[in-house]
Image (cartoon, grey):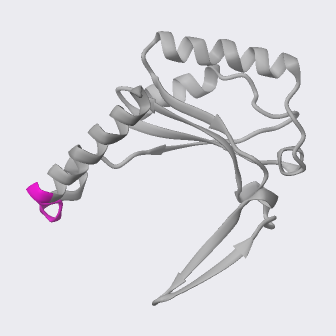
Amino acid sequence: MRFMILIKADQNTEAGKMPSEHLLSEMGKFNEELVKAGVMLAGEGLQPSSKGARVKFSGNQRIVTDGPFAETKELIAGFWLWEVASKEEAIAWVKRCPCPLEGEAEIEIRQVFEAEDFGHEFTPELREQEDRLRDQIAAQQRA
């Protein structure tokens, strides 16, 4: 099972404040544990929403809104992609994580859809396309 682990933003991350050397060191150690355990597939911090944009879809119309965005607590400051046996295992790993922000922080855990979750609508042709794209991505990452 794959899970996206979402680190919620706060006023500091939205202001572009960089983490302390101590926090970077602690997160580095935690990431090493995740990699050694075969859990971590990817993980990155994100720039503040002031450097981002949103695209709203309304029929054929596309409306672009540049950041920053209000409601800091709804924004994401970083993420991991993990592969674990269960949601409970993902929760156990998150509990071991150093607090990712100064003061309080919130981390959200969301399961990633797998091909079988889509049922009959995910036809053999669509599955083949998905597999081909995953192979292409893996080849690009090795290059």
Compared across the picture, whether 68 is left or right of 140 comes to right
66 and 80: which one is in front?
Answer: 66
Q: Residue at x 46, y 89 (%)?
A: 60
Which of the 4 quarters of the picture holds residue 104? top right
Q: Residue at x 45, y 38 (%)?
A: 3
Quadrant the N terminus occupies: top left
Residue 1 appears anywhere in the view: no
Compared across the picture, whether 60 is left or right of 116 comes to right
Residue that sits furthest to the left in the current view: 124
Compared across the picture, whether 5 is left or right of 138 comes to right
Q: Which residues are magenta?
A: 120-125
Q: Residue 7 location, x and y as percent? A: 67, 41
Q: Residue at x 45, y 25 (%)?
A: 89
117 and 143: which one is in front?
Answer: 143
Q: Residue at x 87, y 33 (%)?
A: 102
Q: Residue 77 location, x and y as percent? A: 72, 45
